[in-house]
Image: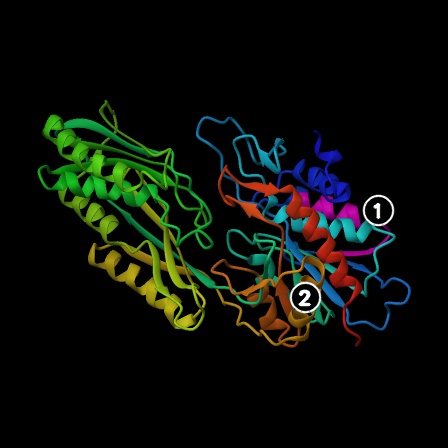
Amino acid sequence: MELSNIEPQIIWKNFSKLNAVPRPSKKEEKVIAFIKEFGENLGLETTVDEVGNVIIKKPATSGMENRKSVVLQSHLDMVCQKNSDVNFDFETEGIKMEIDGDWVKAKGTTLGADNGLGVATIMSILESSDIPHPDLEALFTIDEETGMTGALGLKPGQLTGQILLNLDTEEDDEIDIGCAGGIDVTITQNYETEAPNGQIVRLEVKGLQGGHSGMDIHKGFGNANIILGRLLYKGLEKENIQLISIDGGGLRNAIPREAVAIVSVRNAQEFILEVTDLKKEILDEFATIETGIQINIENTTSSEKALSEADSKKIILALKSLHNGVYRMSPDVKDLVESSNNVARVELKGGALRILNLSRSSVEFSKYSVAEQLKSVAELAEMNVEFSGSYPGWKPKPGSEIVQLMEKIYVEKFSEKPHVVACHAGLECGIIGANYPEMEMVSFGPTIRGAHSPDERANIPSAQKFWAFTKDILANIPLK
């Protein structure tokens, strides 16, 4: 079956058009031009602001002029992750999609349903002629996935809407009313290098499922960087180690799936035996949740120089000590992760070290508590630490008019109560709300699995449910 034949056809048609346009975070020029042209071709007022956000305005349909105005919001960029054996260039190629039962997925890459299905839904409403709705402002933001610079750059006064519907969550039975804030913690240091004085060994961790570093952080998935750190630390018990290179993980908001280290040890046979014992324990530890995990430890060769044993030990101890995963559960909201950290990227090359973290929290002081723990470990290891990209969380308002309306419509339409929740992901609502404090906000979306990983897939029946729900919400927006 072709995507164009799936219901609702208008959604999948627009999603297919969007996915034909490359749209990596921070490289959204092509998709900005695509959405701008889309709005202009519809004859709608279309503007691009200073940072690249696209705003398209559509007047109310007949009889809806006296309703509160609505901002429909989604982000244009997507997380770009692929399997290591897939040859794909996110900057020049469109996503290659396929249907697998009730799911749409990509061929070895992220799908871009986060947040492409939200974008496609807004496009579908803008081009419709038979969907009742109040005055609309479609806000397409940029760079949500790697800094939220689109939301941060949105100035007061650009929007006039009284209600904001953010179409960027991943469970179709949830109405989201709050989210976590975040901060980037970057650890760096440069080291002198020297000729390795031992035998060369390669350690590789791969086959992990990865996932969203906010929504999936509590699920116990393996982090390739952390597992690699455990293996290196185990090797320190019997061997002095010289690190030559490390290449682990990728984007801050994706749980690392793969990591590789090249090291020099004085007795490779003893080192491999020692680390292999831990390998067996790790494979057993993750047997039920990481069925594809692979750990390879083997002799190899390298022409690269190595760090000293003393500097290598500092890095290994730091990697073993950096907090990863849930830091604190919320004492106020059941089952909500309050704060966490993802050790997202570890890179050592030519003596230059970079460790990228994303710390999240729904409570501002807790966010900095996590970041400061990382800083303390890094400074003990004589590394440099920089905080950047901080953005606020979104405080829940469960009694707001739009939340009550959506709960009522959901029950009437689907004969069950929705889950009204706060999430541990970073949504743009908190940032936008800082400049538009009177605007009521809510987030919802279709069911998506495996976001931020090549296993990302969108549920077809859920997209149908989401489309029907969205149309009913717009048709029943309260009076001004």
Q: Residue at x 61, y 72 (%)?
A: 435
Q: Say whether disc 1 or disc 2 marks the residue closer to the N-terminus.
A: 1
Residue type beneath disc 2: Met
Residue 46 position within the rendered picture, expressed as x and y whole percent measured from the top left: 78, 55
Amino acid carrying label 1: it is Asn
Q: Is residue 372 visible?
A: yes
The residue that mark 2 highlights is 406
In this view, the mark in front (1 or 2): 2
Task: Establish if 369 lies above or below 130.
Answer: below
- Where residue 380 appears, as percent x and y from the top left, is 20, 58
Q: Residues within 10 Å of mark 2 (few under 14, many from 20)?
A: many
Q: Which mark is residue 41?
A: 1
Q: Is residue 474 magenta?
A: no
Kindly state the secondary structure of the residue where label 1 is placed.
Answer: helix
Label 1 crowd bin: few (<14), some (14–19), many (20+), radius 10 Å: few
The spot of residue 99 in percent (x, y) is 63, 32
Check the image and report above or below for 339 versus 172: below
